[in-house]
Image (tube, rainbow, N blue to C red):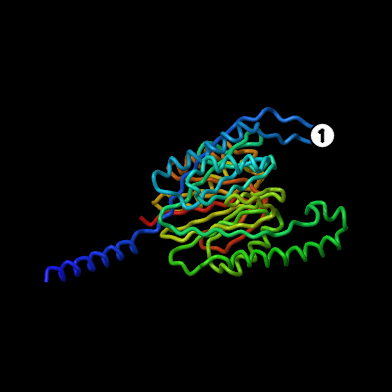
Amino acid sequence: MKYKLLILLILITGINLIGFTRNIPRNVKFTVGQSVYELPASTKINGEIDWHFADSVTTFKLIRKAITDALEQFGNEKPKLLLIMGRAEDKLLIKSAIEAANVDNIPYIFDGSNWAEYTVIGPAAATHQLQQSFIAIAMGGNADYQIHSLHVPMFKDQYWSLEQKYGKDSTEKILAVEKVKYIQSAKELANQFDTSRTGNKVYIQLGNFHTPRQNWVLEGISEVFKNMNIVGGAQADWGWQIIDGKLVESTLYGIMITGDFKVSQAMCSRNKDEALHIQSERILKSAIGDKEQKPDLALYFGCAGWNSDQKNQYDVIKKILPNTTFFGRFNGGEIGRFVSNGSNQSGIDLLSVMLLYNTN
Protein backbone atom coordinates (compact mmCIF):
# COMPACT_ATOMS: atom_id res chain seq x y z
CA MET A 1 0.00 0.00 0.00
CA LYS A 2 2.76 2.43 0.96
CA TYR A 3 4.50 1.77 -2.38
CA LYS A 4 1.31 2.69 -4.24
CA LEU A 5 1.10 5.91 -2.21
CA LEU A 6 4.76 6.66 -2.99
CA ILE A 7 4.20 6.12 -6.73
CA LEU A 8 1.08 8.32 -6.59
CA LEU A 9 3.05 11.05 -4.79
CA ILE A 10 5.81 10.92 -7.41
CA LEU A 11 3.25 11.17 -10.23
CA ILE A 12 1.50 14.15 -8.61
CA THR A 13 4.84 15.89 -8.00
CA GLY A 14 5.86 15.27 -11.62
CA ILE A 15 2.60 16.67 -12.95
CA ASN A 16 2.96 19.76 -10.75
CA LEU A 17 6.54 20.27 -11.92
CA ILE A 18 5.47 20.00 -15.55
CA GLY A 19 2.74 22.55 -14.94
CA PHE A 20 5.16 24.83 -13.12
CA THR A 21 7.65 24.56 -15.97
CA ARG A 22 4.99 25.43 -18.50
CA ASN A 23 4.02 28.51 -16.49
CA ILE A 24 7.53 29.96 -16.24
CA PRO A 25 7.39 33.42 -17.87
CA ARG A 26 9.20 33.39 -21.20
CA ASN A 27 10.96 36.68 -20.66
CA VAL A 28 13.75 38.11 -22.78
CA LYS A 29 17.18 38.67 -21.29
CA PHE A 30 19.81 40.79 -23.02
CA THR A 31 23.20 42.02 -21.88
CA VAL A 32 25.43 44.28 -23.96
CA GLY A 33 29.19 44.70 -23.86
CA GLN A 34 31.03 47.42 -25.74
CA SER A 35 34.63 48.36 -26.48
CA VAL A 36 35.76 51.70 -27.92
CA TYR A 37 39.12 52.74 -29.39
CA GLU A 38 40.16 56.22 -30.55
CA LEU A 39 41.64 56.02 -34.04
CA PRO A 40 44.33 58.38 -35.32
CA ALA A 41 43.08 61.34 -37.34
CA SER A 42 41.98 60.48 -40.88
CA THR A 43 44.08 61.47 -43.88
CA LYS A 44 43.08 61.82 -47.52
CA ILE A 45 44.48 59.62 -50.27
CA ASN A 46 43.78 60.86 -53.80
CA GLY A 47 41.17 63.18 -52.37
CA GLU A 48 39.35 60.38 -50.52
CA ILE A 49 39.25 59.84 -46.75
CA ASP A 50 41.32 56.86 -45.65
CA TRP A 51 38.98 54.54 -43.74
CA HIS A 52 41.51 52.97 -41.46
CA PHE A 53 41.18 50.58 -38.56
CA ALA A 54 42.97 49.67 -35.36
CA ASP A 55 45.93 47.33 -35.66
CA SER A 56 45.33 43.58 -35.46
CA VAL A 57 46.30 43.19 -31.81
CA THR A 58 44.05 46.06 -30.73
CA THR A 59 41.12 44.83 -32.85
CA PHE A 60 41.47 41.35 -31.36
CA LYS A 61 41.37 42.80 -27.83
CA LEU A 62 38.40 45.05 -28.63
CA ILE A 63 36.24 42.15 -29.79
CA ARG A 64 37.21 39.94 -26.88
CA LYS A 65 36.42 42.72 -24.42
CA ALA A 66 32.97 43.39 -25.87
CA ILE A 67 32.05 39.69 -25.80
CA THR A 68 33.54 39.07 -22.35
CA ASP A 69 31.69 42.05 -20.88
CA ALA A 70 28.37 40.83 -22.28
CA LEU A 71 28.89 37.28 -21.01
CA GLU A 72 30.02 38.37 -17.54
CA GLN A 73 26.85 40.42 -17.15
CA PHE A 74 24.76 37.46 -18.27
CA GLY A 75 25.87 35.38 -15.28
CA ASN A 76 26.01 31.60 -15.01
CA GLU A 77 23.22 30.98 -17.49
CA LYS A 78 24.32 30.29 -21.05
CA PRO A 79 22.96 32.74 -23.66
CA LYS A 80 21.13 31.36 -26.67
CA LEU A 81 22.67 33.76 -29.20
CA LEU A 82 25.51 36.24 -29.54
CA LEU A 83 25.17 39.15 -31.97
CA ILE A 84 28.37 41.18 -32.50
CA MET A 85 28.46 44.32 -34.62
CA GLY A 86 31.17 46.80 -35.53
CA ARG A 87 33.31 48.32 -38.24
CA ALA A 88 36.14 46.00 -39.26
CA GLU A 89 38.06 44.66 -42.23
CA ASP A 90 40.09 41.52 -41.44
CA LYS A 91 37.54 38.69 -41.52
CA LEU A 92 39.81 35.90 -40.30
CA LEU A 93 41.10 38.02 -37.42
CA ILE A 94 37.53 38.79 -36.35
CA LYS A 95 36.59 35.11 -36.53
CA SER A 96 39.55 34.06 -34.38
CA ALA A 97 38.84 36.79 -31.80
CA ILE A 98 35.20 35.72 -31.46
CA GLU A 99 36.09 32.07 -31.10
CA ALA A 100 38.72 32.90 -28.46
CA ALA A 101 36.11 34.68 -26.34
CA ASN A 102 33.16 32.36 -27.10
CA VAL A 103 34.47 29.37 -25.17
CA ASP A 104 30.98 27.91 -24.64
CA ASN A 105 30.32 27.77 -28.41
CA ILE A 106 27.23 29.94 -28.23
CA PRO A 107 25.63 30.35 -31.69
CA TYR A 108 26.82 33.70 -33.00
CA ILE A 109 26.61 36.27 -35.78
CA PHE A 110 29.15 38.96 -36.51
CA ASP A 111 27.87 41.80 -38.69
CA GLY A 112 30.64 44.06 -39.94
CA SER A 113 31.16 46.91 -42.35
CA ASN A 114 34.13 48.94 -43.52
CA TRP A 115 32.03 52.06 -44.07
CA ALA A 116 33.16 54.82 -41.71
CA GLU A 117 29.57 56.02 -41.22
CA TYR A 118 28.22 52.65 -40.07
CA THR A 119 28.93 53.06 -36.39
CA VAL A 120 27.28 51.45 -33.36
CA ILE A 121 25.56 52.51 -30.14
CA GLY A 122 25.98 50.66 -26.87
CA PRO A 123 26.24 51.20 -23.12
CA ALA A 124 29.64 52.91 -23.39
CA ALA A 125 29.02 55.33 -26.24
CA ALA A 126 27.46 56.23 -29.56
CA THR A 127 30.64 56.05 -31.57
CA HIS A 128 31.78 58.21 -34.45
CA GLN A 129 33.93 57.82 -37.54
CA LEU A 130 37.23 58.34 -35.69
CA GLN A 131 36.46 55.55 -33.25
CA GLN A 132 36.50 51.82 -33.74
CA SER A 133 33.88 50.15 -31.61
CA PHE A 134 32.29 46.75 -31.21
CA ILE A 135 29.11 45.81 -29.37
CA ALA A 136 28.30 42.25 -28.31
CA ILE A 137 24.72 41.38 -27.41
CA ALA A 138 24.07 38.22 -25.42
CA MET A 139 20.47 37.08 -25.88
CA GLY A 140 18.70 34.54 -23.72
CA GLY A 141 16.28 34.13 -20.84
CA ASN A 142 13.25 31.89 -21.25
CA ALA A 143 12.20 33.45 -24.55
CA ASP A 144 12.52 31.49 -27.79
CA TYR A 145 15.03 32.67 -30.39
CA GLN A 146 15.14 31.71 -34.05
CA ILE A 147 17.68 32.88 -36.60
CA HIS A 148 17.79 32.22 -40.34
CA SER A 149 19.82 33.68 -43.19
CA LEU A 150 19.71 33.73 -46.97
CA HIS A 151 22.26 34.69 -49.64
CA VAL A 152 20.97 37.22 -52.18
CA PRO A 153 23.32 38.08 -55.10
CA MET A 154 24.33 41.75 -55.19
CA PHE A 155 23.47 44.27 -57.88
CA LYS A 156 25.67 44.02 -60.94
CA ASP A 157 26.81 47.59 -60.19
CA GLN A 158 26.42 49.96 -57.26
CA TYR A 159 22.90 51.38 -57.07
CA TRP A 160 23.99 55.02 -57.20
CA SER A 161 26.07 54.46 -60.37
CA LEU A 162 23.39 52.67 -62.40
CA GLU A 163 21.82 55.68 -64.08
CA GLN A 164 25.20 57.16 -64.97
CA LYS A 165 26.28 53.87 -66.59
CA TYR A 166 23.08 52.69 -68.24
CA GLY A 167 20.72 55.65 -68.50
CA LYS A 168 17.37 56.24 -66.82
CA ASP A 169 15.24 53.79 -68.83
CA SER A 170 17.68 50.89 -68.48
CA THR A 171 18.13 51.63 -64.78
CA GLU A 172 14.37 51.40 -64.22
CA LYS A 173 14.35 47.98 -65.90
CA ILE A 174 17.30 46.79 -63.77
CA LEU A 175 15.60 47.96 -60.58
CA ALA A 176 12.32 46.29 -61.56
CA VAL A 177 14.14 42.95 -61.81
CA GLU A 178 16.00 43.55 -58.54
CA LYS A 179 12.77 44.42 -56.77
CA VAL A 180 11.17 41.11 -57.71
CA LYS A 181 14.33 39.26 -56.66
CA TYR A 182 14.47 40.87 -53.23
CA ILE A 183 10.76 40.51 -52.51
CA GLN A 184 10.93 36.81 -53.33
CA SER A 185 14.14 36.34 -51.32
CA ALA A 186 12.63 38.10 -48.30
CA LYS A 187 9.56 35.86 -48.48
CA GLU A 188 11.80 32.80 -48.71
CA LEU A 189 13.71 33.97 -45.64
CA ALA A 190 10.54 34.68 -43.65
CA ASN A 191 9.07 31.27 -44.50
CA GLN A 192 11.99 29.56 -42.75
CA PHE A 193 10.67 30.75 -39.37
CA ASP A 194 8.21 28.75 -37.27
CA THR A 195 5.48 31.21 -36.31
CA SER A 196 3.36 28.59 -34.51
CA ARG A 197 5.35 28.86 -31.28
CA THR A 198 3.22 30.43 -28.56
CA GLY A 199 3.88 33.91 -27.24
CA ASN A 200 4.25 37.45 -28.46
CA LYS A 201 6.66 37.87 -31.38
CA VAL A 202 9.04 40.47 -32.73
CA TYR A 203 11.25 40.22 -35.78
CA ILE A 204 14.60 41.97 -36.30
CA GLN A 205 15.68 42.26 -39.95
CA LEU A 206 19.40 42.73 -40.63
CA GLY A 207 21.92 42.09 -43.39
CA ASN A 208 22.86 43.61 -46.75
CA PHE A 209 19.89 45.51 -48.18
CA HIS A 210 21.02 49.09 -48.55
CA THR A 211 18.40 51.49 -49.91
CA PRO A 212 16.16 51.07 -51.87
CA ARG A 213 16.15 47.37 -51.03
CA GLN A 214 14.94 47.82 -47.45
CA ASN A 215 11.55 48.68 -48.96
CA TRP A 216 11.49 45.51 -51.07
CA VAL A 217 12.69 43.35 -48.17
CA LEU A 218 9.97 44.73 -45.90
CA GLU A 219 7.36 44.12 -48.59
CA GLY A 220 8.44 40.49 -48.85
CA ILE A 221 8.60 39.66 -45.14
CA SER A 222 5.34 41.52 -44.49
CA GLU A 223 3.54 39.15 -46.86
CA VAL A 224 4.51 36.32 -44.50
CA PHE A 225 4.45 38.16 -41.15
CA LYS A 226 1.11 39.91 -41.50
CA ASN A 227 0.86 41.77 -38.18
CA MET A 228 4.21 41.16 -36.51
CA ASN A 229 6.23 44.02 -35.00
CA ILE A 230 9.31 44.42 -37.20
CA VAL A 231 12.42 46.55 -36.73
CA GLY A 232 15.75 46.63 -38.51
CA GLY A 233 18.49 48.40 -40.37
CA ALA A 234 20.33 47.75 -43.63
CA GLN A 235 24.06 47.13 -43.86
CA ALA A 236 26.13 48.45 -46.77
CA ASP A 237 26.62 46.32 -49.90
CA TRP A 238 30.13 45.47 -48.84
CA GLY A 239 29.14 44.65 -45.30
CA TRP A 240 29.74 41.02 -44.38
CA GLN A 241 28.80 38.49 -41.75
CA ILE A 242 30.24 35.52 -39.91
CA ILE A 243 27.45 33.14 -38.95
CA ASP A 244 28.59 30.34 -36.65
CA GLY A 245 32.06 30.38 -38.18
CA LYS A 246 30.99 30.69 -41.82
CA LEU A 247 32.02 33.83 -43.70
CA VAL A 248 29.18 35.19 -45.85
CA GLU A 249 28.44 38.31 -47.89
CA SER A 250 25.36 39.76 -49.58
CA THR A 251 23.16 38.14 -46.96
CA LEU A 252 19.77 38.78 -45.41
CA TYR A 253 19.26 37.43 -41.91
CA GLY A 254 16.56 37.74 -39.33
CA ILE A 255 16.07 37.10 -35.63
CA MET A 256 12.61 36.20 -34.32
CA ILE A 257 11.98 36.38 -30.58
CA THR A 258 8.91 34.74 -29.05
CA GLY A 259 8.03 35.16 -25.39
CA ASP A 260 6.09 36.89 -22.64
CA PHE A 261 6.72 40.55 -23.29
CA LYS A 262 5.01 43.66 -24.59
CA VAL A 263 6.24 45.79 -27.47
CA SER A 264 6.09 49.47 -28.34
CA GLN A 265 7.62 51.27 -31.31
CA ALA A 266 8.13 54.73 -32.75
CA MET A 267 9.85 56.13 -35.82
CA CYS A 268 10.41 59.54 -37.38
CA SER A 269 11.91 61.15 -40.45
CA ARG A 270 14.87 63.42 -39.94
CA ASN A 271 14.12 67.15 -39.80
CA LYS A 272 17.36 68.87 -40.79
CA ASP A 273 16.16 72.14 -39.27
CA GLU A 274 16.08 70.63 -35.80
CA ALA A 275 18.92 69.20 -33.68
CA LEU A 276 19.11 65.42 -33.85
CA HIS A 277 19.12 64.89 -30.10
CA ILE A 278 15.82 66.79 -29.80
CA GLN A 279 14.27 64.47 -32.38
CA SER A 280 15.75 61.44 -30.60
CA GLU A 281 14.24 62.53 -27.31
CA ARG A 282 10.83 63.05 -28.88
CA ILE A 283 10.82 59.67 -30.60
CA LEU A 284 11.89 57.80 -27.45
CA LYS A 285 9.18 59.50 -25.41
CA SER A 286 6.66 58.69 -28.13
CA ALA A 287 7.60 55.00 -27.96
CA ILE A 288 7.27 54.96 -24.17
CA GLY A 289 3.95 56.80 -24.26
CA ASP A 290 2.05 56.77 -20.98
CA LYS A 291 3.46 53.48 -19.75
CA GLU A 292 4.56 53.54 -16.12
CA GLN A 293 6.81 50.50 -16.57
CA LYS A 294 10.22 51.26 -18.05
CA PRO A 295 11.29 48.98 -20.92
CA ASP A 296 13.76 46.17 -20.34
CA LEU A 297 15.29 46.49 -23.81
CA ALA A 298 15.63 49.24 -26.41
CA LEU A 299 16.72 48.73 -30.04
CA TYR A 300 17.84 51.89 -31.82
CA PHE A 301 18.28 51.99 -35.62
CA GLY A 302 19.18 55.30 -37.24
CA CYS A 303 20.32 56.49 -40.64
CA ALA A 304 24.08 56.77 -41.11
CA GLY A 305 23.44 60.44 -41.78
CA TRP A 306 22.29 60.79 -38.16
CA ASN A 307 25.66 59.90 -36.66
CA SER A 308 27.01 63.44 -36.85
CA ASP A 309 25.40 64.02 -33.46
CA GLN A 310 26.13 60.70 -31.78
CA LYS A 311 27.05 61.85 -28.29
CA ASN A 312 23.88 63.89 -27.86
CA GLN A 313 21.75 60.94 -28.99
CA TYR A 314 23.55 58.68 -26.54
CA ASP A 315 23.01 61.19 -23.72
CA VAL A 316 19.29 61.29 -24.52
CA ILE A 317 18.98 57.50 -24.29
CA LYS A 318 20.82 57.40 -20.97
CA LYS A 319 18.69 60.23 -19.57
CA ILE A 320 15.31 58.81 -20.59
CA LEU A 321 16.13 55.09 -20.15
CA PRO A 322 18.87 55.01 -17.48
CA ASN A 323 18.22 51.40 -16.43
CA THR A 324 17.30 49.96 -19.82
CA THR A 325 19.61 47.66 -21.77
CA PHE A 326 20.01 49.12 -25.24
CA PHE A 327 21.99 48.74 -28.44
CA GLY A 328 21.81 50.01 -31.99
CA ARG A 329 23.48 50.92 -35.24
CA PHE A 330 23.50 53.58 -37.95
CA ASN A 331 22.37 52.08 -41.25
CA GLY A 332 21.62 52.57 -44.93
CA GLY A 333 17.86 52.03 -44.68
CA GLU A 334 15.59 51.57 -41.67
CA ILE A 335 12.47 49.56 -40.80
CA GLY A 336 9.98 50.20 -38.00
CA ARG A 337 6.62 51.74 -37.12
CA PHE A 338 5.69 55.38 -36.76
CA VAL A 339 3.26 54.39 -33.99
CA SER A 340 3.03 51.15 -32.03
CA ASN A 341 -0.37 50.17 -33.42
CA GLY A 342 0.49 51.23 -36.97
CA SER A 343 1.82 49.25 -39.90
CA ASN A 344 5.46 48.40 -40.56
CA GLN A 345 7.20 51.03 -42.69
CA SER A 346 10.65 51.51 -44.20
CA GLY A 347 12.77 54.21 -45.75
CA ILE A 348 16.00 56.16 -45.38
CA ASP A 349 16.96 59.08 -43.16
CA LEU A 350 14.81 57.62 -40.37
CA LEU A 351 15.19 56.87 -36.69
CA SER A 352 13.45 53.65 -35.62
CA VAL A 353 13.07 52.50 -32.01
CA MET A 354 11.63 49.27 -30.59
CA LEU A 355 11.09 48.77 -26.84
CA LEU A 356 10.44 45.42 -25.11
CA TYR A 357 8.79 45.10 -21.68
CA ASN A 358 8.89 41.79 -19.82
CA THR A 359 5.47 40.90 -18.45
CA ASN A 360 6.81 40.17 -14.94
Please provide percent x and percent y for residue 67: 51, 41
Please provide percent x and percent y for residue 257: 49, 58
Quadrant of the rendered structure where residue 171 is?
A: bottom right
What is the residue that sits farthest to the top in this orientation?
40
Residue depicted at x 73% and y 59%: 153
Viewer-proximal residue among 143 and 287: 143
Is 175 displayed left or right of 185 in the figure?
right
- The residue identified by callout 1 is 47
**Residue 338 visible in the current orientation:** no
Is 138 displayed left or right of 37 in the figure?
left
Please provide percent x and percent y for residue 293: 39, 51
> Quarter of the image containing the C terminus?
bottom left
Viewer-proximal residue among 26 and 317: 26
How many other residues sit within 10 Å of disc 1, few (<14), some (14-19) or many (≥20)?
A: few
The three-letter code of the residue at mark 1 reads: Gly
Residue depicted at x 69% and y 49%: 236
Seen in the picture, residue 134 relative to 354 is either above or below; the reply is above
Please provide percent x and percent y for residue 195: 51, 67
Residue depicted at x 40% and y 56%: 142
Question: Which element carries disc 1, helix, strand or loop?
Answer: loop
Seen in the picture, residue 140 relative to 56 is either above or below; the reply is below
**Residue 171 visible in the current orientation:** yes
Q: How many marks?
A: 1
Residue depicted at x 58% and y 62%: 344
